Structures are given as structure tokens and as C-alpha cells.
Image (cartoon, grey):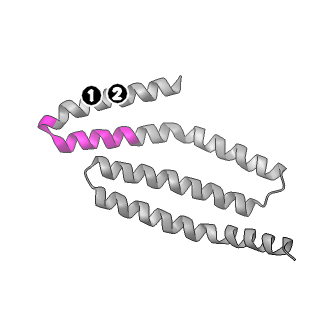
């Protein structure tokens, strides 16, 4: 039922922002950003639970926690950077949103290098 509360909050804030935007656009933007942050914080326990399950499964499958941790960090970076860039777009800062997305892509690429190297080394062992 939590999704109903989140959708309800989103719709109420959307209507309030539309009404508020006519007279005080900065307040409407601030209201939307605050609602987005609240929704993100409400979802954090569910996200943490998923990460815990994935770590447990990786432990059972004897997958190196270094690689699993890196993959989970990459997923986290993707979600957080997307969230931040959407807030910037909502505030009318599309250029800043693009820079956040670019920075996130670079960080993900840097973090993925050890995994890519490990996969390539494994493939090289298989090929005679």
C-alpha cells in the first residue's frame, strides 16, 4: 500500500505546484524538490532490503563480494544521479542535469574497469 501513499503524495504535490507556479514559481519548484526527496527517503529501506538480498545471494553463489559490491555501487550511482538530474530538470536546469549524468557515466566507467578486466582475464583463460 506504500505505493498508493507515494502516488497520492505525488498527485497532491503536483496539483499544488501547478497552482503555486502561477504566483510563486520558485516556491513551486522547491515544493516539487522537497516531495521528490521525501519519496526517495521513503523508498530507501526497500532499496536497502534489495541490496541485502543480492549480497546474501552473491555470498551463497561464491561470487566475490568485491565485484558484487562494485555492481551494487554502480546501480546506486545510476539511481542517485538520475534522481539528481531529474530534480535539476524540474528546476529548469537542463544543462546542469546533463553534467550530472555525464559525471555519473564517467564514475560508472571507472568503477566497472576492474570487473571488465576480470571478465577478460577469465575469457583469456578459456581460449587456448
Instruction: Please tell me whether residue 2 is drawn above or below residue 41 in the rendered image.
Output: above
Residue 58 position within the rendered picture, expressed as x and y whole percent measured from the top left: 77, 52
Residue 40 position within the rendered picture, expressed as x and y whole percent measured from the top left: 46, 41
Q: Is residue 37 left or right of residue 79?
A: left
Magenta region: which residues? 22-36
Q: Residues within 10 Å of mark 2 (few under 14, many from 20)?
A: few
Q: Residues within 10 Å of mark 1 (few under 14, many from 20)?
A: few
Q: Which residue is mark 2?
A: 11
Residue closest to the far front: 128
Q: Residue at x 42, y 38 (%)?
A: 38
Q: CA distance from mark 1 to mark 2?
A: 6 Å
Residue 41 position within the rendered picture, expressed as x and y whole percent measured from the top left: 48, 41
Q: Residue at x 44, y 29 (%)?
A: 6
Labelled pair 1, 2 in contact (Cβ < 8 Å): yes
Residue sitting nearer the eye, 62 or 118 = 118
Residue closest to the far right: 128
Q: Is residue 29 magenta?
A: yes
User: Majority secondary structure of the magenta segment?
Assistant: helix
Q: Residue at x 74, y 72 (%)?
A: 120
Q: Is residue 23 magenta?
A: yes
Residue 27 picture quarter: top left
SS for callout 2: helix
Q: Which residue is mark 1?
A: 15
Q: Residue at x 79, y 70 (%)?
A: 123
Residue 111 position within the rendered picture, expressed as x and y whole percent measured from the top left: 60, 67
Amino acid at each position: 500500500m506504500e505505493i498508493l501513499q507515494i502516488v497520492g503524495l505525488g498527485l497532491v504535490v503536483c496539483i499544488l505546484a501547478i497552482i503555486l507556479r502561477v504566483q510563486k514559481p520558485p516556491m513551486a519548484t522547491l515544493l516539487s524538490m522537497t516531495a521528490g526527496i521525501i519519496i526517495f527517503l521513503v523508498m530507501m529501506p526497500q532499496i536497502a532490503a534489495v541490496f541485502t538480498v543480492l549480497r546474501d545471494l552473491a555470498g551463497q553463489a561464491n561470487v566475490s563480494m568485491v565485484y558484487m559490491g562494485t555492481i551494487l555501487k554502480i546501480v546506486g550511482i545510476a539511481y542517485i544521479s538520475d534522481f539528481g538530474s531529474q530534480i535539476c530538470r524540474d528546476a529548469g536546469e537542463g544543462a546542469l542535469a546533463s553534467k550530472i549524468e555525464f559525471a555519473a557515466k564517467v564514475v560508472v566507467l571507472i568503477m566497472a574497469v576492474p570487473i571488465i578486466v576480470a571478465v577478460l582475464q577469465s575469457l583469456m583463460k578459456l581460449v587456448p
